[in-house]
Image (tube, rainbow, N blue to C red):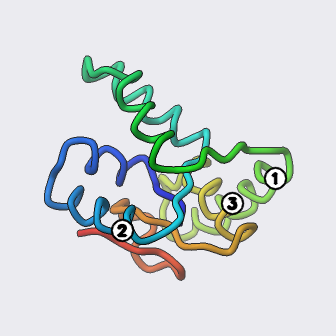
Amino acid sequence: MIIDAYAWIEYLFGSEKGRKVRDLLEKKECYTLESNLAEIYEWTKKNNEDFDFFQKIIITKSKLLPINRVDWLRAVEIKLEQKKRYKDFGIIDALLIAKQELIKCEILTGDNHFKNLKNVIFIS
């Protein structure tokens, strides 16, 4: 299961959605994309939070997955497909789907861009 930045932030703050993430973390093998770690870093900078603390938790609870050229190229195709439904569908969201296709797993998120996609565990 790939954990999206959205789900990590909920988990790190112990929200109701975060408790659902915690329960799933204990049951499944979990991954985090390097790109999602960057999103969390940006979020911590904007919100004066301790990135090093968050990063340690994420690396302890999941395996960090690198993004390579094949992932980026597939992500462009996915982004262009998804833009037909969501004008603001981003490349990082597309990377999640590209990596999901490659390793054949689920994505854990609460991001509305993923709400009706296959192999998504949507926390609400």
Q: Do residues under tags 1 and 3 come within 8 Å of each other at their CB atoms? A: no
Bin the neighbour count of mark 1 within 10 Å (Cα to Cα): few under 14, some 14-19, many 20 and up. few
Disc 2/disc 3 C-alpha distance (Å):
19 Å
Q: Which of marks 1 and 3 is in front?
A: 3
Bin the neighbour count of mark 2 within 10 Å (Cα to Cα): few under 14, some 14-19, many 20 and up. some
User: Mark 2 — residue?
Assistant: 24
Q: Which of marks 1 and 2 is in front?
A: 2
Disc 1/disc 2 C-alpha distance (Å):
30 Å
Q: Which amino acid does label 2 sit on?
A: Leu
Q: Taking 52 as reference, is 98 left or right?
A: right
Instruction: Where is residue 52? Give x, y as percent.
Output: 41, 21
Q: Of helix, strand and loop, which one carries label 1?
A: helix
Disc 1/disc 3 C-alpha distance (Å):
11 Å
User: Mark 1 — residue?
Assistant: 73
Q: Of helix, strand and loop, which one carries label 2?
A: helix
Q: Taking 45 as reference, is 30 above or below it?
A: below
Who comes first in sequence, dot 1 or dot 3?
1
**Residue depicted at 26% across the width and 17% down the height:** 48
Q: Do residues under tags 2 and 3 come within 8 Å of each other at their CB atoms? A: no
Q: Which amino acid does label 1 sit on?
A: Leu
Instruction: Where is residue 41? Give x, y as percent.
Output: 44, 27
**Residue depicted at 51% across the width and 39% down the height:** 59
Instruction: Where is residue 25? Give x, y as percent.
Output: 39, 62
Q: What residue type is labelled 3?
A: Lys
User: Mark 3 — residue?
Assistant: 99
Q: Taking 31 as reference, is 4 left or right?
A: left
Who comes first in sequence, dot 2 or dot 3?
2
**Residue depicted at 41% across the width and 71% down the height:** 27
